[in-house]
Amino acid sequence: MAPTKKVGILGATGTVGQRFILLLADHPVFTIHALGASSRSAGKPYKDAVKWKQAKPIPANTENLTVMACVPEEFKECDVVFSGLDADVAGDIEMAFLKSNLVVFSNAKNYRRDPTVPLIVPTVNTSHFDIIPYQRTVYKQSKGFLITNANCSTTGLVVPLKALQDAFGPMTHILVHTQQAISGSGYPGVPSLDILDNIVPYISGEEEKMEWETSKILGGSDGQQFLPLTNTIVSATCTRVPVIDGHLESVSVKFANGCPSVEEIYKVLEEYTTEPQALGCHSAPQQAILVNKAADRPQPRLDRELDKGQAVTVGRVRPCPVLDIKFMLLVHNTVLGAAGSSVLNAEVAVAKGLI
Amino acid sequence: MAPTKKVGILGATGTVGQRFILLLADHPVFTIHALGASSRSAGKPYKDAVKWKQAKPIPANTENLTVMACVPEEFKECDVVFSGLDADVAGDIEMAFLKSNLVVFSNAKNYRRDPTVPLIVPTVNTSHFDIIPYQRTVYKQSKGFLITNANCSTTGLVVPLKALQDAFGPMTHILVHTQQAISGSGYPGVPSLDILDNIVPYISGEEEKMEWETSKILGGSDGQQFLPLTNTIVSATCTRVPVIDGHLESVSVKFANGCPSVEEIYKVLEEYTTEPQALGCHSAPQQAILVNKAADRPQPRLDRELDKGQAVTVGRVRPCPVLDIKFMLLVHNTVLGAAGSSVLNAEVAVAKGLI
Amino acid sequence: MAPTKKVGILGATGTVGQRFILLLADHPVFTIHALGASSRSAGKPYKDAVKWKQAKPIPANTENLTVMACVPEEFKECDVVFSGLDADVAGDIEMAFLKSNLVVFSNAKNYRRDPTVPLIVPTVNTSHFDIIPYQRTVYKQSKGFLITNANCSTTGLVVPLKALQDAFGPMTHILVHTQQAISGSGYPGVPSLDILDNIVPYISGEEEKMEWETSKILGGSDGQQFLPLTNTIVSATCTRVPVIDGHLESVSVKFANGCPSVEEIYKVLEEYTTEPQALGCHSAPQQAILVNKAADRPQPRLDRELDKGQAVTVGRVRPCPVLDIKFMLLVHNTVLGAAGSSVLNAEVAVAKGLI
Amino acid sequence: MAPTKKVGILGATGTVGQRFILLLADHPVFTIHALGASSRSAGKPYKDAVKWKQAKPIPANTENLTVMACVPEEFKECDVVFSGLDADVAGDIEMAFLKSNLVVFSNAKNYRRDPTVPLIVPTVNTSHFDIIPYQRTVYKQSKGFLITNANCSTTGLVVPLKALQDAFGPMTHILVHTQQAISGSGYPGVPSLDILDNIVPYISGEEEKMEWETSKILGGSDGQQFLPLTNTIVSATCTRVPVIDGHLESVSVKFANGCPSVEEIYKVLEEYTTEPQALGCHSAPQQAILVNKAADRPQPRLDRELDKGQAVTVGRVRPCPVLDIKFMLLVHNTVLGAAGSSVLNAEVAVAKGLI
């Protein structure tokens, strides 16, 4: 069956845009119809406009597409528009697309705090799609809407936390320390002189994002507004490490209603199922959470590509002397942590009949 | 003035042993008199027995010393014996040396829990030397004694914690996450296939060591026994990262008596002074704690060599939403975190008249 | 169609053995029947015997196979035996297997110089299979035989050289400098302290291997003996670099019959076809040589996985002021450079009716 | 004795400029008097203008100096001006300084080919200073002059080649392959995504520079013009590797007058002495060439800091089957390969009475 939905990609020459192109190269539902980038690239064949940095080559059906300017007229035939735009330009462009009645799935941070824009991690809170009808009334659109996905580190964090919250009730305290891969900062991104034989113990704005995004994503929605967690405190520390792909996170949590055992937690993580799986979405992982009980796992280089990069690997669950339980998780920051979330969110939206 | 104290080095061919040799190459008090290693090396000139892995060459006064077996008779002229032995052999050898009335400063973990053996970080708890007279009565020695220094990660942690404890009273909770350099596991140590483009989220035994050593070091001594902290809970997570030297640690703490401000904490850290400085010890850092308020410091490659590797650099002091305060620290794991502690401890012992 | 040939893997727990298992996981012709390793591993399920270091998990059909000792009786049902054994044990074991009338494809160096054992790079000299009937008479076997494949660096080198030799006649001088990945030395292999922020400018025995193996592989065979090149001088320099997979080689050559143009060379490389492709072998690359004319290619991380790791990427063809022409090539050292060569060689042998 | 010569540094905030500041921090002859950088930095205290990337902190006597614009008036009191300017601005600025009768030592490539400007590696061809009187007449200056130093890779190459040329006569062929550290491209320089787990086999313009600079430096001077080598062919291949500091080079050479033995070559390298040593210059290495006969040396991380980074380490001298002899060398690319050459050249000029 041929793909039936035409998609556009904004910021197609950037690192997130390149991931979109790989994820959509042989997609059963989506076919790449239009590519958008800066005016410097517009008018060129994609292969000439891009500094391609992926281990797989540019797909043959994309390399000769002409890059367009990021204006709605060029994308009006697109059923879905994926945005990998940088935050400094995403605000105006994405709003123009939304107001042109287009469907936008954005990786940028600009509208994540918007009270009618869902912040969706596809294996966590696809229930937040229920606000779309209301969003359309606010922005006066018949079929367009705007969905954001979360910061790459937040994305990894909320997947196991959602499983734990569903099973054991609310958490009062969450303390997380990240070791983030260089691909998270795009290209040219982190200078090699800063990160070879080194760690940079700071990523601008990242800790704040992790702290508030977690609350919105793990909270509810009543169809007209989001109901962020109010009794959960999050403390995040974020560092950059010399790893290509894959964010490793060390997490300690405290539960409001008493501490489950390590075995109970492993069982809940292993049995966690999600809506994209139930809907049979193409990019859904077989398991949203992969448990690895080896003493020294997860590891970025060994675990990041598992299940197409759409799963979160969790290991080292053990008691935390200070809070209740601690564990480590790994998320592929440019797949589930970025473009992969957008694509899976869009698949869910198609399955729900929103597109 | 020529050095007056003869020293021996056990485990002289290992990575800690190599650091001892560099630290003692031009020392004003200590002169290298004897080198000990395994029977495989004994009898060879040092330069032929060692796989030298330091950026500085083997000091000229050491390269032709004949390596000895690690038996007390070969070291009986030594005023001080430094041990860089691995734990699997350190137990028997160090005890034999102690029982031969020799003075031993050990990096090994074997006697750290011994109720009469001090576990001393030189810029933290040199007051624990007060147990030596009692130790001598227990082991029936007239001048010999045994001092251990702490695990490399613990060493970095307790320096700022001691400053905070002195100023603001006890801490109830300490949560620490480490990113540890490969040199911490010796040579050949970590296989490159395990750590290039990767992180290993586990170091065998390390988390337990950090949790109990902190309590012994930050606790008191009454001259006959140690009084570890009883109301302080420590939770440690330890990881290995692709960095040559320098352990980075992210720390959150909660105080029993209320939370000081960030400014108060910086002031206390900057003003912290220690006994080795007061005694004018050769290897004492100018400042036991170096404060760096830049947003992205400390960093291993830029800060590890400061103040001869004997200082701890602290930065990013800020409120912790979950506990009270969080900050980051960097310690040179093979200098202050290993051989440098031993040497400075020995200098203090000389200054105190114990040797 | 179900696989019809049963295969065994010797040295199955090593890094080459692990590659064999991945390459044979879903193979149309070969099915894994027996795994061999040291006596320490024998009797255990594979998943318990191995320290698995691959980014893909252990295939489900292999993880519970019981590891056997490397003795012919345990492999007598195998149509093909692949050997990833270390050189220190491969000699005796592989000879025992050959003398038990088994078919062995070996990665070890032990029999590469044997006058009746072919040294075959599958996209270069499958014509050397013509010596098998004679080898069988020498070793008095009816169906068993022994094939070796080349050192990983030699393998990359000879692919473009063969294309050039076929087109432009013999080369008088070949000068090659390698930058070799750490996976080439197995596990634990290169200590991380030796290679992080460093290069090791020496690999024991490697330069000699490149120099003589090239001559045997690029030479002929008359069905009873090999006819190595006699008028071609090879000079090799080999270094180890902090790269996971993929050997990069810089090559300068001088031709006996005058120097072709850069354009002619690119054309010959692009048009080079090989017997495994003609025979339709499953593991044959689509192109044995991938030409990349970008100024800064090939690069290990971007090009090593192309065409399943079975192609050699060549770029930067340009005049050499000292010899005639220089260029750079990249070979995946553990695929085409090791297990991938063996598997493809075996496929060719099946297609030729030798198995 | 207090320093007597005032120096200025152009491009003081760049990576070469930072090295100048460290090299001149406690210099017996030179004292830092003025710092120049772009208009963006001018007017600021140095510590606020610079992104300091060195492991040693900014020297106390420099951190509060006010950065100036790079115009001659601001530097008129300087006896010496060191330039670490980028090539895109160095041309006009350095010429303006020269024409203002200032003494300039430049790291930039702009005037290296100028027929009256020496290209001097201080441990190779300080004899080329003899053209200064003639240069002054050409540029009509009484005391100003302009000296350039060589590309970092050329610098390492010519030191042992000069020793060999002096001893064994001219070389007809030189083939060199480099593995260059990331610090060679400044800051931000090489993106980490390009070089982690990777090699970039191309550095723009570098191979050409090595080929012609070698000829000028190893050639003579008659006081009015340079006499580059005319019968020596150089072929260079340059690559970028994930190493912080230290360029490793693999060299093969052919001599016009027959091939000396390996022992003869080692002897010549070990006994090589240079003019900066004879003149007693402060920054001269104890030995211009350090021979290391270990099988696996030189290595960047272990050898780059030897002799203050001003020596070249040579090892692995052995016959080259294609040319005569091959060997490996290591040069510290930002010390002897850049700022260290300039400083030592200036010391020689002072000793010769030119300043």
Image (cartoon, coloured by chain):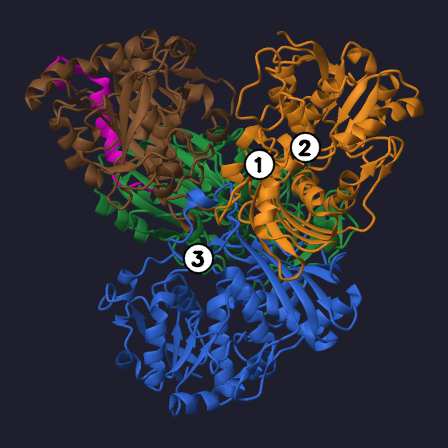
Chain colours: A blue, B orange, C green, D brown
User: Mark 3 is on which residue type?
Assistant: Ser
Magenta stretch in the rendered image: D201-226
Residue B341 included in the magenta stretch of the image: no
**Does dot 1 land on a helix, a strand or a loop?**
loop
Q: Is residue D253 above or below residue C194?
A: above
Q: Residue at x 54, y 74 (%)?
A: A121
Give whichever of A83, A113 is nearer the camera: A113
Earlier residue among tags 1 and 2: 2
Which residue has dot 2 on it?
A: B123
Label 2 chain ID: B
> How many numbered discs?
3
Q: Which residue is mark 1?
A: B245
Assess whether residue D225 is covered by the magenta stretch.
yes
- Between marks 1 and 2 in the image, the one whose residue lies nearer the viewer: 2
- Snapshot quadrant of residue C187: top right
Tell me residue B262's x, y (percent). Answer: 58, 51
Quote the CA–CA distance across marks 1 and 3.
25 Å
